[in-house]
Amino acid sequence: MSAPIIDIRDLSVGFTARAGHTQEVLKSVSVSVHAGETLGIVGESGSGKSTLALASMGYMKPGLRKLKGDVTFQGTDVFAQSLRQLEGLRGGKLGLIPQSSGQALTPTMRIGAQIIEALSLHCHLPASECVSRAEELLDQVRLPDVPAIMKRFPHELSGGQQQRVAIAMALAGEPDALVLDEPTTGLDVTTQKQILELVQDLARERNMAMMLVSHDLGVIARCCHRVAVMLYGEIVLEGPSENVLKTPDHAYAQKLIDAVPRIQKAPATPKPAKPNPPEALSLEGIGISYAQPSFWEKTFGKVKQDSLTVEGINLSLGKGETIGLVGESGSGKSTILKAIAGLMPAAKGTIRVGGDTMLKPTIDRRRPEELRRVQMIFQNPDDSLNPRHTVAEILAQPLHLYFGMTGQKARDRAADMLETVRLTPAYLDRLPRQMSGGEKQRVAIARAFAAEPEIVLCDEITSALDVSVQASVLELLAELKLSKQTSYVFVGHDLAVVQQLSDQVMVLRHGRVCEAGLVDEVYANPQSDYTKTLFDAVLEPGM
Amino acid sequence: MIDLLVRRLALGVVTVWLVSVIIFAGMEVLPGDACTVVLERDAQGEVLENCRKNLGLDRSAVERYLSWAAGAVRGEFGVAADGQTKISTEVALRVKNSILLAFGALVVGVPLAIFLGVVAGLARDRFPDIFVSTAAIFAMTIPEFVSATILVLILSIWLGWLPAVVLTPADAPMLDFWPEFIPAVIVLIMVMVAHIMRMVRSSVIEVMASEYVQMATLKGVPYWRIVFKHALPSALLPAINVVALTVAWLLGGVVVVEVVFNYPGIGRMMIDAISDRDLPIIQALVMLIAATYVLVNLVADLMSMLFNPRLRTLKMRAK
């Protein structure tokens, strides 16, 4: 076998935490990637997988330093290179495809200029050829209308297009190896599938070595020849992906793989048919517009009805039932939640709770009692919990607002609520930053349930969490639903997660309903082409 | 874009109009009027009434506001309380002097502030940054009258290079203020550079830690090219608004500095008018300063829109 392209030997990376005390982020890691091979590096947040990927390019985030070990690229030690030599290597023979290209492309430079920059740095082409070569590259990553894209700024492209531009930029240096740092995180399933296909095709054509970092085992399974599983800065398991993903020889790897929700083609245990539960929530002909009414329209009460972002949404949800809303970004699924919550007024249609109470479109026109009945849990607990409030203060707010509880009484109730979400009362005096992502999301769930709601709106509430944490949060939601007979409207992009929790499902596209029905029926026998495309794009380990 | 411009202009006009109403109402509420000020102890009986009739003060407040506002729109603010000085001529003279001072401070101060801010931001927590940032805190916290006095002590009394105060009359040609206005300019620069520099520094630090700068590094872009092509175009955007505020502050009359150095600008005119209870002049100056603020902020917003592709295309697409 020939020499590896990227060879990492016994690498330790760390930072100085307190006077003299060194904290290791990577502990004696050794991996290598050969030409034409894709190595997957998988692990949960904080496992050091991105640090490893960047270290292979001789780069470390500020504060980190190499403690021991070597990284060689095509036989040269990258940490022994001068800055000048590293500049020639990075973006040249060794390319990077970053996590979210939306943030990784310079916002003030046009797409064309950024690609031409990479070309002029690494290919030494005359200026006249740079433009045509840049257009060629953009064409190669299958972007439409290349001359127009060249003139755009990054924010004028969609997430998938931005990622394609980043790939074109990496290809500009004619790389022998690519480092992909969570290349599809944040993209829709269908876009993710296209991007991965593109990268794989290019890798095959150019016989590139690739190092693919991802927390998503489905992505890893789809692309990688070999997989390394990381935990707390160490590689705990490495081998051909077949072996690692199907018969992992390590307890943590096994746990990680088991935690991945999978779509059940034929429901193992058919959900018991409920004897028509009383109606908890109904939407009739909901239409929502993002267009802000102009000053004149507001003054004279004329609101245009023709530009509705979301239209024709009808649903009826029974007590203790869950409806899953799925669709790609921009399909309007979160917008519907906001309309139910009153955060974004519905331009037309009616929202009813408990079969009788009509909800006003805007939150400031709803009575506290009406507000109490509908609670929302947001995607990212880092954004939805006040960083300066303790858990006790966070939970006391709904208790005070809806039940007038204060002082010790509210504190006792808050402690009870923590126990319902399986946290101990010891968390009462913690601040959000003193908790992990999963714990914070539990607090957010406790806050929603403190109001004793009838309907809980969940907006992608597990997408910011690691798989193993996601599994336990989903379990908790299922438990609460059973014990409190709460109804959920659950927005998710992961079809398996939605299936696990929902009774009904609604597939949305461009703000219109594509398909709706009972989960078991839709998943077993999808009717619309779009739903089928969505199912086809799902990546699962061991498929 | 045009739509936005028109709307912002209209809003600006409304703001200035509201200021005019508030100013006029405020002056109405104050006891006494121009006649009681001019006549002082004689202000009673027939003399007072005649004076009021002559000046048109016997009309209703609304009528007086309308005629004043109509004049203000044409740039005519009537005569000062002494009954002779034409306010517009005097104000124009002072504005010219204030612009001279502001111009001097801006031409030197803005480039200097941006340079220092970028240097400090790039060298975060190392020697140049610590030195510049500490100096900036001193420059910001020392009151202008203290730094002005110290400057006079050093430049005029110990070194004897420059006169301590400006003796040139207000209506002298601009060149006559050279070099007398230098100490005043230096004090202004000290204050404004500190503010702008700190803003630029934190913005540079933020942008240099951004993902796109990391990406540029990993694309093999040399350091200085990253700084100039990738980082600074974004990092300097927030500076536009701080510079605008500084411009408005400078043009709106830097009272303390003008008084300390006896510089005949708007700030001193304002102070003099207040101590003389010269209501027409105060009204005219406040209107002028309000209009300046509105205009400068409008220009700043349009400039940030012009330089920020995100804002620019967002507005265009929204149309």
Image (cartoon, rainbow, N blue to C red):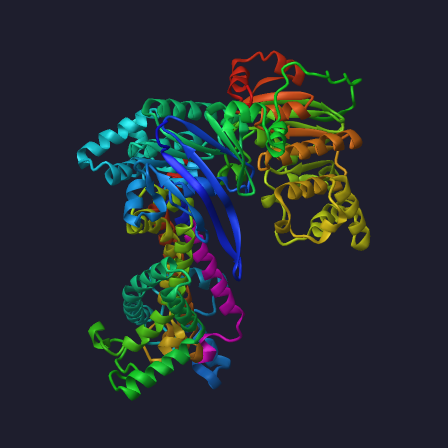
Name the residue rendered at 30%, 64% in the picture. B112
Residue stretch rendered in magenta on the structure: B11-37
Q: Foreground residue, B318 or A111?
A: A111
Q: Is residue B30 in the magenta section?
A: yes
Name the residue rendered at 68%, 52% in the picture. A430
> Does residue A157 show up?
no
From this view, report whether residue A309 is shown above or below residue A104. Answer: above
Occupied quadrant, residue A492: top right
Q: Residue A319: where, in percent of width, then height?
A: 76, 26
Q: Is residue A194 left or right of residue A526?
A: left
Q: Is residue B24 in the magenta section?
A: yes
From this view, report whether residue B276 is shown above or below residue A457. Answer: below
Give the prevailing secondary structure in the magenta stretch. Answer: helix
Q: Residue A213: where, in percent of width, then height?
A: 47, 34
Q: Residue A465: where, in percent of width, then height?
A: 59, 37
From this view, report whether residue A167 is shown above or below residue B69. Answer: above
For the C terminus of chain B, give its image quadrant: top left
Occupied quadrant, residue A72: top left
Name the residue rendered at 53%, 22% in the picture. A538
Q: Is residue A421 left or right of residue A100?
A: right
